[in-house]
Image (cartoon, grey):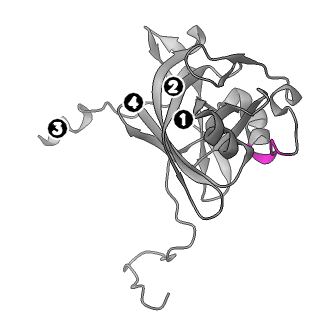
Amino acid sequence: MSDIKEVGGRVNFGSKHPVITPLPCIMIATYDADGHPDVMMAAWGGQCDINQICFELSAHQTTDNLRLKRAFTASFATRANVEESDYFGIATGKKVADKVAHVGFTATPSPNVDAPVINEYALTLECRVVALDDNEDGGARVVGEVVNWSAKDSVLTDGKVDLTKLQPIIYDSADNTYRVVGEIVGHAWKSGKKFA
């Protein structure tokens, strides 16, 4: 890394483990070949088009399920279910037969795609796979088209998702922690108008 030039007046880290934030804790739910629901946490992802999300996975049961079913649901881990959600990121569906039931969660078949809706998550996107690019380690970069999304009344205000009520968590890669999202600090396309 001797060819990297330092930025003056700052601590320089090179390219090792860059901090990109926020990283949403996206809960990817799929069915396996036998129709059993599986869910895992993916932090390397986000929205990549008006109705598409994308994420990167290494080799997992979920990756196999995505190749097979070409569908998934994406929900968001919250303050209320941080422990269960973290477990879904720790345990592998290749070794734990029913992670969903193990933590006391339940699943309902999506009416729109061949994937489960995890009932305990308050906000869920139902998606069909539109691109799945395999990588060297058996994982894949996945793009999903949102065909429907739904939310529980408990996280809505005036018919819109209220992040203060939802309390989604993000992964803080700087120190391997989860942080809650919710406080409003400005308004999109309004706060900066003072400079116009």
Magenta stretch bounds: 89-94
Residue labelled with disc 1: 181
Q: Earlier in the sequence, mark 3 or mark 1?
A: 1
Secondary structure state at the residue bearing disc 3: helix
Q: Earlier in the sequence, mark 4 or mark 1?
A: 4
Q: Are marks 4 and 2 in contact (CB under 8 Å)?
A: no
Nearer to us in this view, 85 or 124: 124
Residue 113 spot, x, y in % from top left = 57, 22
Q: Earlier in the sequence, mark 4 or mark 3?
A: 4
Secondary structure state at the residue bearing disc 2: helix
- Alpha-carbon span between mark 4 and mark 1: 22 Å
Residue plotted at (54% across, 35% down) = 181
Residue labelled with disc 3: 194
Q: Earlier in the sequence, mark 2 or mark 3?
A: 2
Which disc number belongs to residue 51?
Answer: 4
Residue 11 spot, x, y in % from top left = 48, 75
Residue 106 spot, x, y in % from top left = 78, 19
Q: Is residue 3 left or right of residue 96?
A: left
Which disc number belongs to residue 163?
Answer: 2
Q: Earlier in the sequence, mark 1 or mark 2?
A: 2
User: Is 91 covered by the magenta stretch?
Assistant: yes
